[in-house]
Amino acid sequence: MKFLIAAVFCAGAATALPNFHGCSLPEAQSEDYCDNSLPVSARVDALLDSLTLSEKISSSQPYDNGNVCGTTTGGIERLGLPEYTWLIETNTNVASACLDELTCATCFIGPMGMGSSFNRTNWQKKGEVFGTEMRAFNNLNWHRTTNGGKDFIGLTGYGPNINLSRDPRFGRNSELPGEDPFLNGEYASHMVQGMQEEDANGHPKMIAYVKHLTAYSTETNRGHDDYTISPHDLFESYLPAYEKAFIEGKASGAMCSYNAINGSPSCANSYLNNEVVRGWNPDIHITTDCGAVGNLKGDPVNAGSDENAAAMAMNGGADIDMGDLTMTQALENATHLGLLEEGTIDAAWKRSFTPLFRAGRFDPVDEIEWSKYGKESINNEEHQAISLDAALMGQILLANDGVLPLQDGLDVAVVGPMAEGPEKYLSSYAADDICYDGSHSCMTSIYEAIKAENANGATSVAQGCDVSSNSTDGFDEALSIAKAADIVILAVGIDNTVEHEGQDRDDTALPGVQEDFALKVLALGKPVVMVMVNGGGLAIDNLVDSPNAIIEAFNPAVMGPKALALQIYGSENRWGKLPVTLYPHSFVEEQPMANYDMSLSPGRTYRYYEGQPLWSFGHGLSLTDFTLECEKDGEDQTSATCDVANIGPMDGDEVVFVFHTLGDELRKEVTVNHPVPIKSLVDFGRISVLKGEEAGLSFTFSEDIFKVVNEDGDKVLYKGRHTLVFSRGHGDEVHIDYDL
Ligand SMILES: *[C@@H]1O[C@H](CO)[C@@H](O)[C@H](O)[C@H]1NC(C)=O
Ligand SMILES: *[C@@H]1O[C@H](CO)[C@@H](O)[C@H](O)[C@H]1NC(C)=O
Ligand SMILES: *[C@@H]1O[C@H](CO)[C@@H](O)[C@H](O)[C@H]1NC(C)=O
Ligand SMILES: *[C@@H]1O[C@H](CO)[C@@H](O)[C@H](O)[C@H]1NC(C)=O
């Protein structure tokens, strides 16, 4: 009864009932919407029918509860409807406070590393972990750390973020799984399937929203940017990952992005939201990024008034206005002014509430299998094992002259700004608590992880310099321990102070004095294993050739340092492959950040880049070696089998990519009308192969993989020579031709 008393104190505000499980309050018991013998649609209608216009708005548009981005909508006391916080981030963990010192949400490595694994099972498992933990926090009536613990963890999770890593300078690359539409779509669809796993009564564990729809890719003027995007680029690059997430993954909703596309802001873009996205599924629920509706009063649409902005967004397909109160305050008047029909508000309200009903928010807890989850379901051993697995497969061995694996017992110096300070290992939005009370004390540094593996040797550390300052004061100490060691681990990179939401990089080189420091370390002539920690790629042109081994670790977060040490010492051999192109430094002068045309010279991503990358998309070595043989299955056009033989010294994992490309003549004909990628990823498979053994990977294709996107944005099959390229991302490729 405590909450009812609280409600009395807040009389006047129609928002007082806290974020409790729906239909648990006495006022709700006799309401039809709580009658779970009725189908979901009837219950949604019953609740909507009992609301006045202002209640429809207050229950579906956030009020100001003191959060930087208001995302909590009001309750309705007379119907026993509690308030609800919609937005909980779910990109690398379920954003939440820790329950206690030992119980914080499982935090995965940064999404770039997740993309690197090319392992669909692991992506699905990550989603399952999120679903379980979100449900557990919800069952426990737990909260986020932000906003004084007033934001309760509901069942709606925002993430994964799946737009393309279009440019290494973009401040939010660390939130994304890669540069390829097929990869990002597969990642999203498998992760979402894990998140939304259903019980026997059809209750998904949680509801997943993908973001940011779409073509959001610069931070500088993000609230008002307008990008010119051709139908070709929209349907070839910017939308396919979402299409896959919605159609194959059955994602429930999306967060629309700040930017405009061809003059129409994403959150008011009726073509994009109502036609394209709701053409895939009419129920897709769209909420705005924080403050996007208020932004409509500025460029490029200059809505003029709150009523106009609110109506423009809702007519354009946005259902909930997160972060400002424009819809909350202006929707009702907008209907009186004739800017918006009440029926449009009703349709938006239904799209908002249907997922909550589906997830069982208004059902008795004993009818939901997921009610069994509690504290023991959060970051338990099983979840940690999945997270460690992801970390192992999320690191890429870019180069190795044979120095790896290291022998235990040597004298090792760990130097560079990423050697210690594990908070530098987190991607953006690795929120809220990683360790208890917001500390990073539960994280391991690269130095500590190496020291643990080097049990019979001496391990020393000195960072030498920090991430961005120009101070060389630490050089001498670090160089002297490096000089005295048998082997040097040099950990360089960038962290959240350099790239983050709201901050793009101008330059892709290592900041501060890191490159000078690295060159001095290399000049000592010791064997050097260089490790890079970053979200967006680093242009290390001057350091490419000298280290004996180079590892791309992306954002290693909690499990990454341990995974790194296990693989450096050869106790594990599970490496990933690059999910992005690593461009040379010249890229930033040749390609303007604001260019959204993928093919404009020198081109973007492996699909269009004409230059010589430092390392290509898909590249990645192993501590063992493999050979690859592939052939068509008989005359069957639609399947092929590859044999992967492990001919090296140890067990290991390999990834096989399948790319589609047009034959030269056909390409010449077609490119007269529209751009065609150099090649496009159409499938991939990951396999573990024991030393000395071989294993098969089968691929089954639909005719769709031979299609390319034309100038109108349609997928077409051109007659002529097509080729499928089977590759391990480096080394020999197998080409199979098809005359279609
Ligand atoms: C999408 O948004 C993300 C941030 O979440 C950003 O990293 C990415 O570059 C954007 N890209 C596209 C193509 O929309
Ligand atoms: C709605 O319109 C009425 C009548 O014009 C006006 O008094 C009121 O301030 C408006 N409300 C809001 C929130 O703008
Ligand atoms: C370091 O030096 C460079 C080049 O002189 C300068 O552009 C940069 O702002 C300096 N960085 C800091 C953090 O002082
Ligand atoms: C893929 O991921 C799953 C789950 O983490 C793991 O069990 C499996 O071994 C991985 N597969 C390969 C081939 O690495």
Image (tube, rainbow, N blue to C red):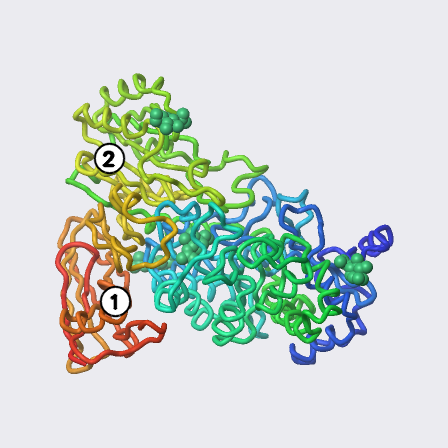
394 above or below 29?
Answer: above
Sequence-wise, the earlier of marks 2 and 1 is 2
Q: Is residue 429 left or right of residue 145?
A: left
Dot 2 falls on a residue whose secondary structure is strand
Count of residue discs: 2
Residue under label 1: 676
Q: Is residue 62 left or right of residue 120?
A: right
**Where, by quadrant of the figure, is residue 102 drawn?**
top right
Q: CA distance from mark 2 to mark 1?
A: 39 Å
Cβ of disc 2 within 8 Å of ligand 4? no
**Where, by quadrant of the figure, is residue 446 drawn?**
top left
Residue 725, position as x, y percentages in the image: 18, 66
| Residue depicted at x 22% and y 32% | 528
Dot 1 falls on a residue whose secondary structure is loop
| Residue depicted at x 26% and y 79% | 717
Q: Amino acid at mark 1?
A: Val
Residue 620, position as x, y percentages in the image: 23, 50
Task: Single out the mark in the foreground, 2 or 1.
Answer: 1
Residue 618: mark: none
Instruction: State the residue in front, 91 or 320.
Output: 320
Q: Amino acid at mark 2?
A: Val
**Where, by quadrant of the figure, is residue 694 drawn?**
bottom left
Residue 491 shows in this picture: yes
Residue 22, position as x, y percentages in the image: 72, 64
| Residue depicted at x 79% and y 68% | 28
Image quadrant holding the C terminus, namely: bottom left
37 above or below 159?
Answer: below
Residue 529: mark: 2
Residue 360, position as x, y percentages in the image: 64, 68
Quadrant of ligand 4: it is: bottom left
Instruction: State the residue in front, 652 or 496.
Output: 496
Q: Is residue 501 left or right of residue 401?
A: right
